[in-house]
Image: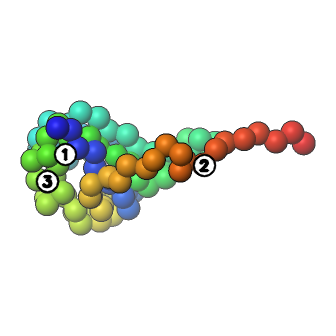
Amino acid sequence: MAKKLYVGNMNYGTTEDTLRSLFAAHGEVLSVNIITDRLTGRAKGFGFVEMATDEAAKAAIAALNGKDVDGRQIKVNEANERPRDSRPRSFSREF
């Protein structure tokens, strides 16, 4: 069963390829997604990595939580799924 991991406290310059390489050492990586600001396109300093198995996810958490990546100690733990209703609604204003 796939397991999604939260990766926080990332350097703004860390790339998806860097994360994929780090996590691939601990098991199959299904996806990597660094969250960016919609207006500026700049990374927000966190993202998500989806591992193929629970065992791979646990190994990645144990090995990578607190590891120095691009000058920052990243935080790695299981992602908390947010209910769809709790997401803020976007709206537009006319000025």
Q: Is residue 33 above or below residue 58?
A: above
Residue corresponding to mark 2: 88
Q: With 45 as the anchor, is 70 left or right in this view? A: left
Please name the amino acid that badge 2 sits on.
Pro
Q: Is residue 92 left or right of residue 48?
A: right
Q: Which three-letter amino acid code belongs to the residue tagged 3?
A: Lys
Q: Earlier in the sequence, mark 3 or mark 2?
A: 3
Q: Name the colour scheme.
A: rainbow
Mark 3 or 1 closer to N-term? Answer: 1
Tag 3, which secondary structure?
Answer: helix
Q: Position of residue 93 (x, y in %)?
A: 82, 42
For mark 1, give the secondary structure. Answer: helix
| Mark 2 / mark 1, whichever is N-terminal | 1
Quarter of the image where the C terminus is located = top right
Task: Report the Cα–Cα distance between label 2 and label 1.
Answer: 30 Å
Residue tagged 1? 23
User: Tag 1: residue type?
Assistant: Phe
Residue wearing tag 3: 58
Between circles 2 and 1, the one closer to the viewer is 2
Residue 14 is tagged as none
**Is residue 12 at all visible to an observer of this figure?**
no
Q: CA distance from mark 3 to mark 2?
A: 31 Å
